[in-house]
């Protein structure tokens, strides 16, 4: 059952997903490759690799706080599926 | 080209042999029921589900295409194609996949069409979706088979000159693509979806490891990664960012300024050569090409590329993999790890592609200018690392191709069996064993038809361009699946309008792009998929609101009351 605090956490996580999508559009690194991270990775590539890591983290939080509450107790199949 | 070199051939043969063994092993676990054949008895756990989903979504494009795209357009392709996919694919798994799994577990669906037909109580919608889904999967399949046959032909050239003199000793396309189809057919035929899950797990691990090994070996040959990137900074800095670097622009302007004089000199030499007597004039002067203009990535195109990975929400083969999950919890690992795996595969390949534009050894360019982008990775590997890694890399490329082909073959077999044969030609009269047999027969027919089409289309490039259009088609059906799962008010008429709108806008935009001939085609400065998805969503909403709401009792099945 969802409580007000879990609802708040869920809202925050979805806001985080939207934020990751927004910061993916990194116009601020558009015209440069510097600094080169570790001396060989252009900054925008390193930034987008971090976006991938952020995506992993935000989806881990979604698993914890936004998990749908009607998918874990599935009753026996009642129909054969061909409709 | 290798001279009588069997190394690559042996490595590929051993790899394909291992896959066959894996297929036969997974068939030992087969329970003999149609539910097991098509859905692995809904028993796939978190790790196999992750590997299945990742292996299926990452085609050969992940290895070969990522390097080639970076070689052509620079490292910005990672943000455009990979990090966006990491976010959106997991979104699709979380928002669509888990829900679809729960619907399938509750109501026994085996295919996408069964779900939509039931949700919207419409046979017409099923009939409408059938040709669209099949029609969009087939070019995707063809890209895989064509890619596999061409890769095998290119990497084995020189291996069997006595046997295949017409192809410079390479395994001919008809044979290479045929062998790949047979290997995939064997493990799909015997193991069903469980066989594809095991094969995908094995193949995904193979291509992730090979990507890393290739990266480190190539970096080492180029004097380390810092030196490899330094060469790009000096020669083609645009390849390291998303706008045109002033140095590249200056080089281009200077080259363009000098070009008319060079062109005039060339034409004079050519005229002189043509006027000379044929027996004394020697070789024709080497043709000169206009300097290629450096180009960046537009911000709007970058943004709207976000729509493409939504295709994952409507791929029928992924739909089938979702239904195989043991429980909803099995999705958790895939949702989190998918973006990270994309990063592990893409970052090394993207860097190799950028390095290929400028890498030199002893003052000579490793990759000649204007090289075929899709062949860059194999060329770098062959030139810089040798036959053993070349053989393994080929195995990795084939792994990436086959891990998508298997699921697509099986899902088409499932669609023909469940949505057409069993739905329209009496499911009650036949036993479960017969259903499995029918499924297997359809899989054989689909593999055979795909193989024959690939052989007929060998050498044509158009089908590769179709790939992104197929993805766009699936992506623009995304509003349909979201509406079906989350919007009670979505109606049958709205769903049909959405599919028809998607089909019409797809055909119209595809024709506008010269039937895919304009590779960089944009509509209103955006990727065409953005327009198609928005139109399809608008049609769903507007027509649903204009028509009678679905029956509340029927909706209970899809939106059960909580508590």
Image (cartoon, coloured by chain):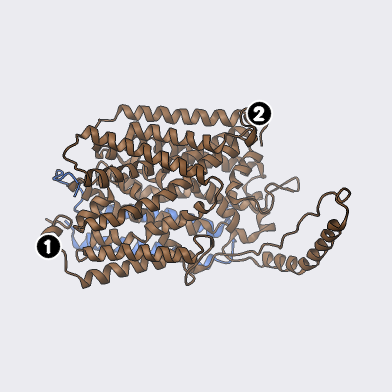
Chain colours: A blue, B brown
**Can I make out residue A51 in this image?**
no
From the viewer's side, name the closer residue of B288 and B306: B288
| Residue at the image position 55 percent from the left and 54 percent from the top | B69
Q: Give the image quarter of residue A37.
A: bottom right
Chain label for disc 2: B
Q: Is residue A3 above or below residue B417?
A: below
Are the residues under marks 1 and 2 on the same chain? yes
Mark 1 lies on a secondary structure that is: helix
Q: Quadrant of the N terminus of chain A?
A: bottom left
**Can I make out residue A8 in this image?**
yes
Q: Which residue is under mark 2? A: B4
- Disc assigned to residue B552: 1
- Residue B192 is left or right of residue B73, and the answer is left
Q: Is residue B124 above or below residue B42?
A: below
Q: State the image coordinates of residue B536 (x, y, percent, origin top left).
A: 33, 66
Q: Is residue B274 above or below residue B18?
A: below
Q: State the image coordinates of residue B294 (x, y, percent, origin top left).
A: 64, 64
């Amino acid at each position: 059952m969802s409580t007000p605090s879990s609802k708040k956490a869920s809202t925050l996580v979805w806001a985080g997903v939207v934020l990751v999508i927004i910061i993916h559009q990194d116009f601020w690194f558009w015209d440069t490759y510097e600094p080169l991270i570790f001396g060989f990775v252009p900054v925008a590539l390193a930034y987008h690799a971090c976006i991938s890591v952020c995506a992993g983290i935000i989806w881990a939080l979604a698993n914890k706080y936004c998990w749908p509450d009607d998918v874990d107790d599935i009753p026996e199949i009642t129909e054969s599926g061909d409709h | 080209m290798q001279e009588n070199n069997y190394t690559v051939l042996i490595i590929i043969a051993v790899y394909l042999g291992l896959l066959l063994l894996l297929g036969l092993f997974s068939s030992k676990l087969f329970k003999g029921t149609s539910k097991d054949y098509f859905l692995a008895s809904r028993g796939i756990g978190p790790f196999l589900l992750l590997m299945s989903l990742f292996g299926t979504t990452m085609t050969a494009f992940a290895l070969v295409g990522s390097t080639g795209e970076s070689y052509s357009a620079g490292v910005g392709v990672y943000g455009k194609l990979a990090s966006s996919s990491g976010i959106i694919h997991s979104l699709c798994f979380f928002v669509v996949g888990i829900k679809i799994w729960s619907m399938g577990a509750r109501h026994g669906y085996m295919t996408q069409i069964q779900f939509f037909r039931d949700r919207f109580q419409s046979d017409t919608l099923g009939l409408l979706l059938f040709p669209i889904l099949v029609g969009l999967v087939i070019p995707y399949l063809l890209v895989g088979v064509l890619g596999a046959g061409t890769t095998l032909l290119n990497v084995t050239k020189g291996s069997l000159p006595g046997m295949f003199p017409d192809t410079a000793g390479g395994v001919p396309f008809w044979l290479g693509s045929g062998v790949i189809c047979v290997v995939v057919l064997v493990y799909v035929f015997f193991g069903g979806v469980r066989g594809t899950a095991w094969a995908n797990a094995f193949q995904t691990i193979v291509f992730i490891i090979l990507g890393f090994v290739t990266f480190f070996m190539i970096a080492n040959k180029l004097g380390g990664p810092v030196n490899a990137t330094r060469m790009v900074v000096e020669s083609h800095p645009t390849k390291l960012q998303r706008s045109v670097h002033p140095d590249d622009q200056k080089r281009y302007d200077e080259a363009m300024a000098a070009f008319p004089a060079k062109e005039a000199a060339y034409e004079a030499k050519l005229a002189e050569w043509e006027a000379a007597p044929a027996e004394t004039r020697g070789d024709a002067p080497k043709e000169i090409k206009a300097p290629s203009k450096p180009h960046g990535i537009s911000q709007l195109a970058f943004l709207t590329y976000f729509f493409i990975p939504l295709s994952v929400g409507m791929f029928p083969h992924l739909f089938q993999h979702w239904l195989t999950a043991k429980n909803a919890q099995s999705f958790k690992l895939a949702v989190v790890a998918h973006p990270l795996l994309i990063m592990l595969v893409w970052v090394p390949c993207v860097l190799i592609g950028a390095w290929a534009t400028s890498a030199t050894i002893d003052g000579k360019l490793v990759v000649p200018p204007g090289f075929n982008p899709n062949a860059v990775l194999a060329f770098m590997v062959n030139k810089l690392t040798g036959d053993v890694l070349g053989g393994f890399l080929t195995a990795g490329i084939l792994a990436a191709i086959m891990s998508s082909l298997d699921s697509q073959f099986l899902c088409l077999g499932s669609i023909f069996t469940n949505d057409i044969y069993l739905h329209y030609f009496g499911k009650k009269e036949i036993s479960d064993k017969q259903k499995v047999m029918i499924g297997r027969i359809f899989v054989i027919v689909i593999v055979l038809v795909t193989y024959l089409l690939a052989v007929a289309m060998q050498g044509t490039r158009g089908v590769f361009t179709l790939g992104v259009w197929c993805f766009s088609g699936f992506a623009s059906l995304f509003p349909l699946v979201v509406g079906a799962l989350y919007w009670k008010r979505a109606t049958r008429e709205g769903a049909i309008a959405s599919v028809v709108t998607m089909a019409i806008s797809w055909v119209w935009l595809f024709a506008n792009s010269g039937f895919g001939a304009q590779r960089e085609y944009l509509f209103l400065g955006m990727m065409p998929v953005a327009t198609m998805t928005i139109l399809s969503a608008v049609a769903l909403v507007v027509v649903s609101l204009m028509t009678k709401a679905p029956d509340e009792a029927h909706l209970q099945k899809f939106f059960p009351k909580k508590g």
